[in-house]
Amino acid sequence: MENWQVILSALHSWLDQASAFLTSLPTAEIIFAALFLPVALALFARSGFAFLGTLLLATLALLNVLEPTFSAFTLAICAYIGSLIVALSGIRARRRNAATSAELISLRNEVDELAQAESRRFVAELKTSAKGMDQQADAGPPVGNAKD
């Protein structure tokens, strides 16, 4: 139990130092660090929902640093907006999965049709070659010019 108290006191001290450091920074640097970097990274994901979620979380962090007295209200609003983003993301993913499944079924049907067509072509080719061999067998050996 003593180990946890040491860890918690060290963590508390570190959080106090980080909080004092963040509040001493100029506003422009906080905006750059809290908004620009995560949002720029989210742009590389090329996903609208990832971008919106990152923007929401970065804004939440910025508002909590700039105005900690409204942190409960800000957290509640951002959590609600975040839940909407997650729900919309789930709808989009379900639609994508349904479209992918439909395309996969269509491709499977096409492959089955092609396999059946190839099978019919192969059987027809076998019948044709078998008829040709039967005709050659019925005709007997080829008659050539025999010289005495």
Image (cartoon, grey):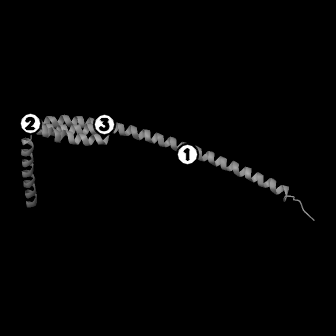
The label nearer to you, 3 versus 2, is 3
Task: Please tell me how crowded label 2 is: few (under 14), some (14-19), or many (20+) other residues with Cα within 10 Å.
Answer: few
Is disc 1 surrounded by few (<14), some (14 to 19) or many (20+) residues within 10 Å? few
Residue 69, label in figure: 2
Q: Mark 1 near mark 3, Cβ–Cβ under 8 Å?
A: no
112 horizontally vs 12: left or right: right
The quadrant in which the C terminus is found is bottom right
Where does label 1 land, which residue? 111
Q: Determine which of the numbered discs, if any, sits on residue 34 in the image.
A: none
Q: Where does the image place residue 131, in percent across and percent down from the top left?
A: 77, 51
- Secondary element at tag 1: helix
> Dot 3: what SS?
helix
- Choose the circle earlier in sequence order: 1 or 3: 3
Q: Amino acid at mark 1?
A: Val
Seen at 8% across and 57% down, the residue is 5
Residue 8 to residue 39: above or below = below
Going from N to C along the chain, the mark reached first, 3 or 2, is 3
Point out the frontmost of discs 1 and 3: 3
**Label 3 vs label 2: CA separation?**
31 Å
Q: Quadrant of residue 89?
A: top left
- In the image, is residue 53 above or below residue 127? above
Determine whether label 2 and label 1 are within 8 Å by CB: no
Tag 2: amino acid: Thr
User: How far apart are labels 2 and 1 at the CA level?
Assistant: 64 Å
Residue type at tag 3: Gly
Question: Residue at 10% of width from left, 53% of height from top?
Answer: 11
Whole-percent x, y for residue 38 in the image: 22, 42
In this orientation, which residue lies closer to the viewer: 79 or 40?
A: 40
132 to 24, vertically: above or below: below
Residue 70: % across, % down: 11, 35
Q: Which mark is residue 48?
A: 3
Left or right, 130 with reference to 143: left
